[in-house]
Image (cartoon, rainbow, N blue to C red):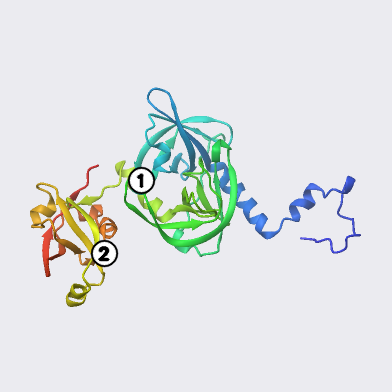
Amino acid sequence: MRLIADENDLSDLGPGGRVPHEAGLDALDPYSQAVVDTVDRVGPTVVHIHGARADGSRLGSGSGVIYTPDGYVLTNSHVVAGAARLTASLTDGRAVGARLVGDDPDTDLAVLQIDAAPLDHGGLEFAPLGDSQALRVGQLVVAIGNPFGFQCTVTAGVVSALGRSLRARSGRLIDSVIQTDAPLNPGNSGGPLVTARGAVVGINTAIFASGQGICFAIGINTAKFVAARLMRDGKVKRSQIGVAGQDVPLDRRLVRFHGLPKPSGILVAGLTDGGPAAAAGLLPGDVIVGFADQPIGGIDDLHRLLTDERVGVAHALTVLRRAEKRTLSVIPREHRA
């Protein structure tokens, strides 16, 4: 890259004192070059998703990213919620039908497949998926989406924090969320968060409405796991034990006496009739402090552990009944929404 060191040196200037197009490209600083390269690589894989109800009325719109050559698209669950018909607009100007493969409101992720033939008779352009665990705070990231319907809009920023938790609309907590200051707006939802190497490391999902520069993306490692389950089963299976409860602090004397690793637990307020917890002997008023040999400090801890692998398998459920610590054996069942 050649810099003009002297303001009197006009050898690089074209007619009218303008920098020639070729010189302008050469003069891009490394930050700009990284963003431009990222957009060139991933931009063509970003789609604009439109939903319509059964009566034909339009729902909101959002974004998505093609991640396989046969047209599978990652987006947000809330982008496709309530839609009887879905359409995806590609960057080449085509509008094509999209089929919902499956969605998971608990992680706000969904997978679609678009009905689009590649223009060159090869595979569709698709974005490579990276590793969100390898991200560093301060790392450059680029968000691509369709805010307010403006196709393929690009913003850039840095990773502000890692390992955040975000409450899904279903009430469950989404873990390993990426915080970024790359500006997002309505319509960016479902679009990719991309590194300077062109790898998708997150699916943009939310903004902090009362703040500035606080935006969130679901880590791509979570998205890869969920997408694989959605493509296989159409949903993400989880387990449940049939308990309604609330987080409560524990008496410090009980925490010390029983050597509990967490100062809180789940106060059991109700039980599903005939459910796994009731069958195990759990009673209203008990406080759950452990499950499957893991400490439980609240409902979110229990939700994280109630995966599909627990279904039909006996696990230890540790509770406080008044001042006594008891261990019950509970067999979780598949959760059915």
Residue 265: x and y in percent read 23, 63
Q: Residues within 10 Å of mark 1 (few under 14, many from 20)?
A: few
39 and 299: which one is in front?
A: 299
The quadrant holding residue 245 is bottom left
102 and 53: which one is in front?
A: 53
Proximity of marks 1 and 2: CB atoms separated by less than 8 Å: no
Horizontal side, residue 7 vs residue 215: left or right: right
User: Which amino acid does the dot numbered 1 rest on?
Assistant: Arg
Going by the picture, which residue comes out furthest to the right? 8
Which residue occupies 47% across, 63% down?
A: 134
Q: Which residue is mark 2?
A: 297
Residue 51: x and y in percent read 44, 31
Dot 1: what SS? loop
Horizontal side, residue 201 vs residue 241: left or right: right
Dot 2: what SS? loop
Horizontal side, residue 313 vs residue 27: left or right: left
- From what the image shows, is residue 59 above or below residue 242? above
Quadrant housing the C terminus: top left
Residue 311: x and y in percent read 19, 52
The quadrant holding residue 283 is bottom left
Q: Residues within 10 Å of mark 2 (few under 14, many from 20)?
A: many
73 and 316: which one is in front?
A: 316
Q: Which residue is mark 1?
A: 169
- From what the image shows, is residue 335 above or below residue 61? below
Which residue occupies 88% across, 60% down?
A: 7
